[in-house]
Amino acid sequence: MRALLLCLLLFCPLALGQVWVVPLKGVIGPATADFLVSKLEAAAQSETPVTLVVIQLDTPGGLDTAMRQMIQAVTQSPIPVATYVSPSGARAASAGTYLLLASHVAAMAPGTNLGAASPVAIGMPSQPEPGTEEAEPEPAEDPADKDKVVARTTLEKKALNDAIAYIRSLAELHGRNADWAEQAVSEAASLPASEALAIGVIDLMADNLDQLLAEIAGREVQLQSRPHTLDSGGEVVVQEPNWRHRFLAVITNPNVAYILMLVGIYGLILEFYNPGVGLPGVLGGICLLLAMYALQMMPLNYVGLGLMLLGIILMITEALSPSFGLFGIGGVIAFALGSTMLMDSDLPGYQIALPLILAVSLTSLGLFTLVLSLVLKIRRRPATTGDVQLTGAEAEVVDGFPGPGRVRLGGEIWHATSEGPLAPGQSVTVTGRQGMTLAVTQRKETP
């Protein structure tokens, strides 16, 4: 009986422990980083002991800043982290490779792959395919151009060498194949799961999560530079994103942030142009603030943003002070160019869709073409106010004349002068105006 109680006391803490599974799928960005960091912090502060966090990964890569934020959270976590690339068909490409190597346990399911971790940025050419020779650059005739080529190459080498040093340090942190990790960056090398296990890039392969937890039970890892024995026998709890992270994932989509920014700007313009409506201003302000929050978390190109704002200003100028299309067309061109340059990244997940840019630009062009045509149509109409409208108008004598008198014109009484005598009720013709006094003459009867 005492032996049974002793066994219950010994195994009770293990039964109370939990294993958290954090699914990460899609492009790594600010929302992904915020989700993972918050879950690692919550696991460390959980009332129920969390013995292991498993990242279930499937990603084509993502932003460098978000990746480094996630890796720092993993390496500094007081709870061991196992990254598991699954299910079959998933991948840990680019930023996912860094995250996999940074984890205390690196595991993959059959039919998955990792690698292709070369840094990609605006202005940086893609790395040559393995086994091919890179074309030599044409010599620059101008010494100044040669200096620019050297400077550009130096910047590319700096980025490449930094990425190589970073991924080697992550691989060496847990005794994995640092030489292949370097090839993943320098040559954009990729590996299937079986080959990655054979050359020591990952720790193990597992068909499913249950098999993974069974195989890593009792494994010793380095946790914050100290040996730690893994306990993977607790209750498995899947941590799904809450409403905040789902909302953040939506607004940090470049296309959504782009639309929010446009709705915000045009809403405020409409409010300023026609004050007192309220709804456009409130909606525009909310959308603009959401767009600003989203854009500050993404790789923003401020030249592109400046071109967009210039384009909007030019189109507004065309609407308020028509220049026969000069400002409007120039504004649409600047707006379209700025939209294509807005995201300072070559990642497909962080590019504004070209059809969306074309649709917005063509809609703006059509709108201001319509405004211009209406303005030109109005300009061709004869004047309906002022001296041009008064001259030749018919009025009725009230009293006076010759000399000063009064006439009724359009329901109003005007002071008037006439050189000849006029009788009350007689019809006269306005020949001019001096200040608030009309010049009238006797109306000629038509035969």
Image (cartoon, helix red, strand yellow):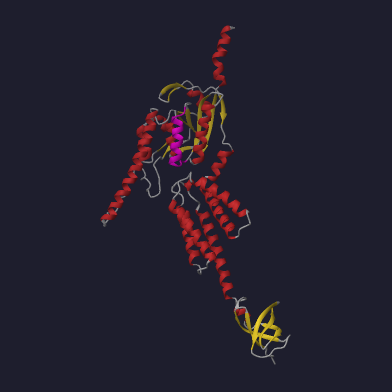
Q: Is residue 192 toward the left or the right of residue 438 in the image?
A: left
Q: Is residue 62 magenta?
A: yes
Which stretch did the figure color magenta? Answer: 60-77
Tally of numbered discs: 0
Q: Residue at x 55, y 39 (%)?
A: 245
- Looking at the rendering, which quadrant does residue 319 occupy? bottom right
Quadrant containing the N terminus in the rendered view: top right
In which quadrant of the rendered image does the C terminus lie? bottom right
Q: Is residue 247 above or below residue 232?
A: below
Where is residue 19? Give x, y as percent.
Answer: 54, 26
Q: Is 233 located above or below residue 305 in the figure?
A: above
Label the magenta part by its dominant secondary structure.
helix
Q: Judge by depth and name the residue closer to the eye, 65 or 351.
A: 65
Give 43 or 229, whichever is nearer the viewer: 43
As drawn, is 302 to the left or to the right of 261? left
Please say if 334 is above or below 215.
below
Q: Between residue 375 and residue 72, name the one nearer to us.
A: 375
Q: Which residue is found at the position 59% from the left and 72% from the top?
A: 378
Q: Position of residue 416 (x, y in %)?
A: 65, 83
The answer to whether residue 256 is visible is no
